[in-house]
C-alpha cells in the first residue's frame, strides 16, 4: 500500500461571512465547577486549570463556586461603573473618528472586564504593560478622559507630545507603561521590569496583556522563557478574543490546545478564565498576584472573550466573519452579566443603570469640550515643533541644540 503524501494543514475559520456563527469549538466549564488550588500549590496540581475554564457567574447571575471572592456590592458597582464608562467612551470616540475629528481609534467592546477587573485586583503600585485595547486599565486607575482624548488629538496637552499614534497612551505616575504599536513587545518588557523589582527586593509585580494573535510573535516565547527561568513576579495575560485582525484564533495555534496550556510547557502555571465574567477575572488575577508576591513566580492567564467590534477604525469585520457572530457569543456581555448579578443581589436596578449611562454620557461630552480647548486636527493651538528634540537624550547633544535653535529661527521663535 502506497504511503499517503503529507499535506499542509491550513486552519479554517469557524464561519465565514454569510454563514451562521459557529462556536462549537469553544470548550467551557460549568460555573463554579473548577477547583481553586492554594497559591502555593505545585505546578502539577495547577496544570488542569490550563484546559478548564474558571467561571463564577452562572446563567442566572449568581456567584457560585470556590473562585467566588464575595466582593462587596459597592466594589462591584465601582467595577460596573468603570466598564460602562469604558464602553460609552469607546462609542463616543468611534463616532468622533467617523466625523474626521481624530484619525484613528481602537475599541474594546466586549472585553471591558479583562481590563477593569484585572486593574482592580492589583495594587496601585503594580506596573501595568498594556496593549492598545486596554483603555479600561486607565479608567479603573482614574486617568482623566480629557488626557486620553488629548492624546488622540495630538494637541498641546498630548501626553506623548504628538509622537505616538492615537490610543498609544502612557502614564508614569499611574504605573502604566507606554503602549507600543509593535506586537508583543510589552511581554518581555514586563518580565524585565518584574526581574528588576525582585532584584531590588520590592513587593511589586508587573502585569501585561497581549492578544492571542500576538502569542505567535517571538517576544511571547522570549518572555515566558525569562519569566520561568528567573521566576519573575509577573502576570502574563493572553486576551483570546477569537480574532487577530482578520484571522481566527486558530491561526495562532488555538485549534490544537488552549493558549493557557503553553504555560506548563515552560514550567509556568496556565489558567484559562471566562474573560466576560468580571468576578472570575478578578479572582484569577488576585490568585496569580498573591502567588507572585509569595515568590511563586509568573502565571500565564488566558482570558476567553470576544472582540465585538472591529479590530480598529481601519477594519471591516463583515469581510471575514458573520455579522451576527457577536450576538451569538456563548459567554455573553460582561456589562450585562455584572449588572444582572447586582440586580440579583438587590443592589442595582434597570433605572439606576439608565441613570448611570446618562450621567457618564454627559461627563464624556464635557471632557470632549475641555480637550478640544487644547487643539484639534483642524484648529489650534498646536504643539511647538521644537518639542520634538525633547525626551530623546538625558543630556541633549550640541548637534541637536543647534538644530533646535535653527528650527526656532526659521519659525521666528
Image: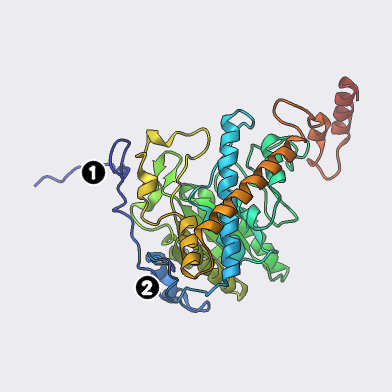
Q: Which residue is mark 2?
A: 33
Reply above or below: 89 against 373.
below
Q: Nearer the viewer, mark 2 or mark 1?
A: 2
Reply above or below: 99 against 262.
above
In depth, the one of 125 and 67 nearer the eye is 67
What is the number of the mark on residue 210?
none
Reply above or below: 216 against 301.
above
Give the quarter of the figure containing the C terminus: top right
Classify residue 159 as left or right of residue 259.
right
In depth, the one of 398 and 89 nearer the eye is 89
Reply above or below: 369 against 302.
above
Residue at the spot x=15%, y=46% of the render? Answer: 3
Residue at the spot x=78%, y=36% of the render? Answer: 156
Circle 2 residues within 10 Å: few <14, some 14–19, many ≥20: some
Residue 288: image quadrant is bottom right
Q: Which residue is mark 1?
A: 6
Secondary structure under the numbered disc 1 in the rendered image: loop
Farthest residue in the front direction?
351
Query: Pointers 2 and 1 in contact (CB under 8 A)?
Result: no
Residue 398: image quadrant is top right
Q: Position of residue 148 (x, y in %)?
A: 68, 44
Q: What's the CA distance linking mark 2 and mark 1?
A: 41 Å
Q: Position of residue 293 (x, y in %)?
A: 62, 73
Q: Position of residue 378 (x, y in %)?
A: 71, 25
Secondary structure under the numbered disc 2 in the rendered image: loop
Residue at the spot x=34%, y=52% of the render? Answer: 255
In depth, the one of 77 and 292 nearer the eye is 77
How many marks the image carries: the answer is: 2
Q: Position of residue 178 (x, y in %)?
A: 67, 48
Question: Residue 222: in sight, yes or no?
Answer: no
Amino acid at each position: 500500500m502506497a504511503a499517503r503524501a503529507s499535506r499542509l494543514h491550513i486552519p479554517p475559520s469557524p464561519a465565514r461571512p454569510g454563514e451562521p456563527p459557529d462556536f462549537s469549538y469553544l470548550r467551557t466549564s460549568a460555573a463554579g465547577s473548577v477547583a481553586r488550588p492554594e497559591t502555593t500549590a505545585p505546578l502539577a496540581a495547577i496544570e488542569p486549570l490550563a484546559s478548564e475554564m474558571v467561571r463564577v457567574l452562572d446563567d442566572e447571575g449568581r456567584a457560585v463556586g470556590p473562585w467566588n471572592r464575595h466582593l462587596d456590592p459597592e466594589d462591584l458597582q465601582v467595577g460596573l461603573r468603570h466598564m460602562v464608562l469604558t464602553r460609552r467612551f469607546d462609542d463616543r470616540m468611534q463616532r468622533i473618528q467617523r466625523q474626521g475629528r481624530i484619525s484613528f481609534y481602537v475599541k474594546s467592546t466586549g472585553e471591558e472586564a479583562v481590563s477593569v477587573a484585572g486593574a482592580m485586583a492589583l495594587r496601585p503600585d503594580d506596573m501595568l504593560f498594556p496593549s492598545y485595547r486596554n483603555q479600561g486599565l486607565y479608567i479603573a486607575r482614574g486617568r482623566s478622559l480629557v488626557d486620553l482624548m488629548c492624546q488622540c488629538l495630538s494637541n498641546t496637552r498630548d501626553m506623548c507630545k504628538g509622537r505616538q499614534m492615537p490610543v498609544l497612551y502612557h502614564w508614569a505616575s499611574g504605573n502604566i507603561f507606554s503602549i507600543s504599536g509593535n506586537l508583543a513587545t510589552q511581554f518581555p518588557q514586563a518580565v524585565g521590569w518584574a526581574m528588576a523589582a525582585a532584584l531590588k527586593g520590592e513587593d511589586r509585580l508587573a502585569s501585561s496583556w497581549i492578544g492571542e494573535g500576538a502569542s505567535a510573535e517571538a517576544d511571547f516565547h522570549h518572555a515566558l522563557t525569562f519569566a520561568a527561568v528567573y521566576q519573575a513576579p509577573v502576570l502574563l495575560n493572553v486576551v483570546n478574543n477569537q480574532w487577530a485582525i482578520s484571522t481566527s484564533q486558530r491561526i495562532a495555534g488555538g485549534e490544537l490546545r488552549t493558549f493557557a496550556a503553553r504555560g506548563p510547557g515552560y514550567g509556568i502555571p496556565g489558567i484559562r478564565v471566562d474573560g466576560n465574567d468580571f468576578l472570575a477575572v478578578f479572582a484569577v488575577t488576585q490568585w496569580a498576584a498573591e502567588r507572585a508576591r509569595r515568590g511563586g513566580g509568573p502565571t500565564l492567564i488566558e482570558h476567553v472573550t470576544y472582540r465585538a467590534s472591529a479590530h480598529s477604525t481601519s477594519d471591516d469585520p463583515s469581510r471575514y466573519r458573520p455579522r451576527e457572530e457577536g450576538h451569538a457569543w456563548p459567554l455573553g456581555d460582561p456589562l450585562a452579566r455584572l449588572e444582572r448579578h447586582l440586580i440579583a443581589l438587590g443592589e442595582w436596578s434597570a433605572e439606576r443603570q439608565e441613570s448611570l449611562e446618562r450621567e457618564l454620557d454627559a461627563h464624556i461630552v464635557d471632557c470632549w469640550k475641555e480637550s478640544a480647548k487644547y487643539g484639534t486636527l483642524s484648529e489650534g493651538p498646536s504643539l511647538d515643533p521644537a518639542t520634538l528634540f525633547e525626551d530623546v537624550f538625558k543630556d541633549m547633544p550640541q548637534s541637536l541644540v543647534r538644530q533646535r535653535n535653527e528650527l526656532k529661527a526659521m519659525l521666528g521663535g
